[in-house]
Image (cartoon, rainbow, N blue to C red):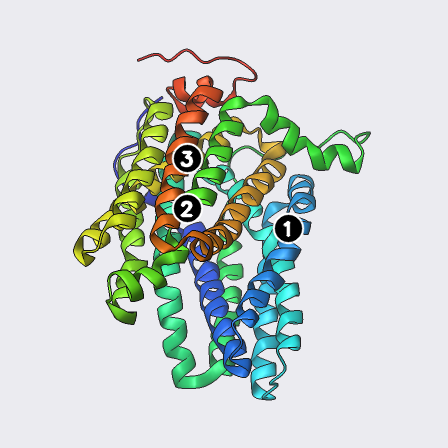
Amino acid sequence: MTTPAPTSIYRQRGFLPFALSRLLAFFAAQIQGIVVAWQVYTMTRDPMTLAYVGLAQFLPMLLLLIPAGDLIDRFDRKKILLLSWGIQGLCGVALALLSVLQINTPTWFYFVLLIYGAGRAFTGPALQSLLPQIVPKNQLAAAIAANSMIMRIASISGPLLGGFIYAVGGGQLTYSLCFLSFMAAIILLQWIPVLYGTQQPQQKDIGAWQRFTAGIQFIRSRPIILGTISLDLFAVLLGGVVALLPMYASDILQVGSQGLGALRSAMAIGEVTLGFYLSIKPFNRHLGLIMFGAVILFGLANLLFSLSKLFWLSFLALILAGAADMVSVYIRSTLVQFSTPDEMRGRVNAVNMLFISSSNELGEFRAGAMAAWVGLVPAAVLGCIFTLAVAGTWMRLFPSLRQVNRFEEANLPNTLVTSTS
């Protein structure tokens, strides 16, 4: 495979409008998410309202992700993405209207968030399925790394800007800007050319249930893909420490809210730095070993953070964990894209998104529950040990993943891949 020239991905005809449109939409989603949580919490001062805000968005995604994947494979992906962003933008209008009317009942906000979550269920699989149709295959790995880096930048700056705008202009101004951002993303979407891997029509005699489960069956037939997405699921589910950062900042490191902000940004610094490097110099050798090494490093870095009582050491440990996580995301996402035929990308990416969403949401619950049960530091340490145990177990359960050398080897079904140099 020809190695692309440095920065060549940024010169691709369709990549920059794709990246900018996704950045605008994700930026709006981040702002909208942080502001509606704050607004609802200030109505009641009840911590459970924050749980309901998350639940209202997560439940429709959980129910709709698999059907969404089927629709994304059957119809125009750009049009589905347009409708998805349109629904989310209109939810911003509804939230702005609730703010103008000074509605102080959280129930109306939860209702809007249910619709918002339904729209979001189509966004992730559609975006992931559209990217391979925009850039050539030999630059797909660099595009995935650049895309991941851009999203991390938005996830850092979005909440900060959202809080500032809300303090200046209230909910109506904030949600109005979110609506405009979604509309700008939709306009940019029209400029994105679909150049590669045009979708093929599906067999008409296949029933709805067979179509829905085809993505799961495909993943089960590819041990490399099953291994990599389940490795990420359990490593993050059992070993993530992000949910515990407020407790560490307050009780262990004693650095207050400013220190908490720095800790929350530390992992992102590692992710963005590695993401930018990988977008310029993507690699395609010894992928299985590197991925397992990255997961092990992620667990060890989190273990160092868990035991540290020095702020600077904890900060560096989280930067290292973020860098390791970016390497894992880069390899996992690219393996999934390389292995999946274009006519099945929606369903496969929907299953992948379901795994990712479950690991993040349930991982936060796991961390908090363990901290309440055994204490803060023991819970964090046990989680890191679980991550290391998962990495070692998966190396034995999925030898084909351990031995995979190049991205092109990911599409081999039910076979043991022999590594080559």
Residue carrying label 1: 62
Q: Nearer the viewer, mark 1 or mark 2?
A: 1
Q: Amino acid at mark 1?
A: Leu
| Nearest to the observer: residue 360 or residue 306 | 306
| Nearest to the observer: residue 202 or residue 230 | 230
When the figure is inspected, residue 190 is found, relative to residue 340, above or below; the finding is below
Q: Amino acid at mark 3?
A: Leu
Residue carrying label 3: 140
Left or right: 10 in relation to 229: left
The picture places residue 198, in percent across and down from the top left corner, at 59, 34
Q: 10 Å neighbourhood of mark 3: few (<14), some, or many (≥20)?
A: many
The picture places residue 23, in percent across and down from the top left corner, at 42, 57
Q: Nearer the viewer, mark 3 or mark 1?
A: 1
The picture places residue 32, in percent across and down from the top left corner, at 49, 69
SS of the residue under disc 1: helix
Q: Quadrant of residue 232?
A: top left
Residue carrying label 2: 15
- Residue drawn at x 61%, y 67% is 113
When the figure is inspected, residue 386 is found, relative to residue 56, above or below; the finding is above
